[in-house]
Structure formats: C-alpha cells, structure tokens
Amino acid sequence: MSALTKTVAQRVVNFGGNLTWQTRCYRPASEAEILDILARHAGGRIRVPGSRHSWSDIAVSDDVSIDMSLFDDVHPFVRDGQHLVRVGAGSTLQSLLERLHRATNQTLPTLGAIKKQTISGAISTGTHGSGRQSLSHFVTRVRLAAYDSGTGRPTVYEYSDGAALRAARCGLGCMGVILSVELRTAPKYKVAEVLQGRRCLSEVLETYADWPLTQFLWAPHGWKWMAFKRKPVGQPKATIGGFVKSRAMRVYNTVGQDVLFHLLVIASRWGGAWLIRWFQTVAPSIVLKNVERIDDAEHVLTLGHDYFRHEEMEIFVRESQLAETCRMLRCVIEAFADRGSTISSADEEKLQAISMLDELRADRGRYVHHYPIIFRRVLPEDTLISMAASVDEPIYSVSLFTYDPPARREPYYEFCSVLARILCRLVDARLHWGKHFPLQYADIATLYPEMENFRELSSRNDPGGVFRNDYTKRVLGLAPGKS
C-alpha cells in the first residue's frame, strides 16, 4: 500500500504544550514513497516534526507533516580509517546510541541534554552539549529529498562537501526532507563529574582548563554560581566500588535532581514571588557537592529533561561578551521581578542607547524568574547558520526555563522578548532556532555572515516554497508557497 493512502488528519501538540496544530500526516516506509508525497504536494506545504520537542513553531505545518520513524536504520562502518555511522533520519538518539554501543566500541562525539530527539531534528536545529561543537558539526554526509530547481520534480540529493553540506548540517527543515545522515563517531568514554560552588564568573571559566565539558548555572535572586565540572576520562579500570557509586549517583540524579528539584520549582512557582526568591536562594546550599562520580558519557551528559512540561529560550553569546551578558541578564531579571527595583545609571545609559530603557521600566514587577540559568560552552563549528557558525572564539549558551503551564506563560514571553532584543542589540546574541524565538529576520539577519548563502541554497532545493511555513517567513525571510 502506498504512503499516499495512509495520510491521517491529526491534532498535534508539541512537548512544551505551547503549540497545537492540525495536519495531514504521512508515515512513509521508503524513499520512493517520500518522492511520491513531494510530487503530490508540490503546491502545498510540508514539514517534518521529528520528536516535536521544539518550542518554536519551526515544525508546524497546517498542511502536510511527514513522520520519518520508519527510517531508523543504524549502520556503523569505517571509511579511510575513520569510524562513522550512517543513521536513518527518524532514529532517536537513544536508539542510535544503544545500537551503536551493541555493535562497536564507538559512541557519539557530543550529546545534548536529551536522547528522545530524532537525529534529523537534532542536527537541523544545532543540538549541542557543553565543551564541544554541536552534533551538526560532526555530520559528514546528508541524503535528502527535495525539488529539482530546473524541472520542479522531486529528487534525491546527497551532500558530502561544500556549502550544500554546511547548509544541510543545520538546515531548519528548509533544504528538504532528510533521509539519512552520516556522522563521525568517537571511542566510547566515561566522564568524571563534580558539582562545586564558585564565587564569580571568572572563577567558573577557569574550570574549563582542566574540565573541558563543564556546564554551570547561576541561581537567580541569590545570585550564586555552581559548576558541574566535567571531563572525559577514557575507560578507567572498572571496580566494584566505582560501579556501586556510579549507580547510586544515577539514582540520586534521577530522584533528587530530575524529579524532586523540579517538583519544588513548580511548588515555589505556585507559592508566589517570595517563595521563588527563597527557594532559588537556598537551593544551591542543599544540593550534593564535592562528590566525584565517573560514569558512561551518556549517563552524565544527559538527564530526565522531559519529566515535566516546560519551555525554554536559549541565547548564545561570544565568550568575550559573556560578562556583559551576565550583568544585563541580572539587571533584566531583577527589574521584571520587582516593581520597585532601580536600574543602575550605567545600565540605564546602555539601555537608552539601544532604545530599550522605557520598555524595561514599564515591565518592572511583571515576572519572577523561577529557575537556575544554565550555561554551556560550544566551540566554533563548520556550518552556515548554526548558533556557533562563523565565530572565532567559544560561545556560551544561556538557557532560561519556565515551568509555568502554557496558559500562564504570557509574562515569561514578555520577559524573553525584552531580554532577547536587549542582548541582540547589545552583544549580538543569537537564539536557538528550535526554542522560544521572539525575534524576527530583521533582528538577526546581520548576525549570520552566511545567511544569504543559506537562503539561496534552500531556495534552489525548494523553488516552490514547499518546505517553508510561518516560522521560516518570520525568522528567515523565506515565505511559503501557495497552499
């Protein structure tokens, strides 16, 4: 039976609960069926939602969606002495890791916080961890279905070098329907982790010299720094004591951090501003610190990120701008949290220069941020428009979460909008494509030196605007074709 007979109209809700849409969904089982779908809907709009974990409307399609879950093959191989894996676009990172580990002594060279994403969704939005480049950087080949610019007919492209590969590595769904990707792999390794307090940002950054995979957090209101010091340690000799300790720490992290901590965050949010401030001030003092654990990389670098529904905006700034970013971040959080707050004269001058002072003053007391600010380090990478593209120094992601239910997120959205515009104008901040994205193309176009090259390449693969939606119009200046 052809995939064209299996289309199902369905209501889709993303993980964060902030987006709902109606779409016709196909679940093809072959490349030929995908080409059939593209031919049938050459005058419509097509998006691939992946695991639906994006908070931005990047995956939304009110016309056609393609479920790639049947494209889940995992094939490790060696080419010219280099270890690689060819993986179907619909395979989740969890499935990829499990099958890669069963078949080889290899693993992925970097990991983000969760493993439920599909590989195509992960690379298409620049999913990253801390201390290395994003997964997109390690892609060596992309096979995708798109349209021939001359004939307009669906065809299969395979990119292994040049600008087209760099575009497809982080293509935001605009280059076509990804069928499979090839990734460089690395020998399996363990990671040592120690949680420690730090007195200031400069002291945190010194940690990277010896612990290159570190990520750190800043607890609002009390403004305390905590560093999750992390470094790769290869494959140290196994001991019974080490085995027991690593398993005990897995339980502690799942129960204590992934579940209990987040329950307390939610409870404090419902308790009001005073309870939020109190909890965020005391939380860094009651967590387990100065205990080293060594475990497999995927158990240290990932977490139960999806146990509770939430939303996130993630901002990326250069290392040279990080201190300025933190100063302004604190200014905005404190202003939003307290109607009677004052803004320093130095900050007033900077905000006035970028035409944001009056708006920030008007929003005082509107929102109390209730979650630690998470920072991760990302190295420069070889793509056209990922968040760490075209930079000559490490960048740091700054994650701002809300655990409010969707119906109560309007103050959070206003906070994000103000903060994003301030940091975009002040320090050339970029936003994560797949997370809350309150900016528009006019705000961000000049931040990406190769944006126009990306737009041209995606238009070549999609002359009719089929792979576009309202998100691509607003954020990339790429309008969809007629439905």
Image (spheres, rainbow, N blue to C red):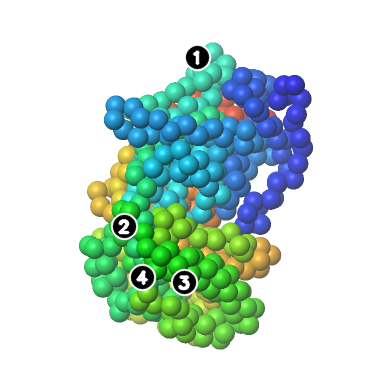
Q: Position of residue 196 (x, y in %)?
A: 35, 75
Disc 3 marks which residue? 372
Query: Image point 35% across, 35% down: which residue?
Result: 83
Report the number of discs: 4
Of the pair 440 and 116, the residue shown nearer to us: 116
The first of marks 3 and 4 along the sequence is 4
Q: Quadrant of the C terminus?
A: top right
Disc 1 marks which residue? 150
Most distant residue in the front direction: 240
Disc 4 marks which residue? 292
Q: Is the residue under label 2 in contact with that under label 3 (CB below 8 Å)? A: no
Q: Nearer the viewer, mark 2 or mark 4?
A: 2
**Disc 2 residue type (three-letter):** Pro
Of the pair 190 and 171, the residue shown nearer to us: 190
SS for tag 2?
A: loop
Q: Nearer the viewer, mark 1 or mark 3?
A: 3
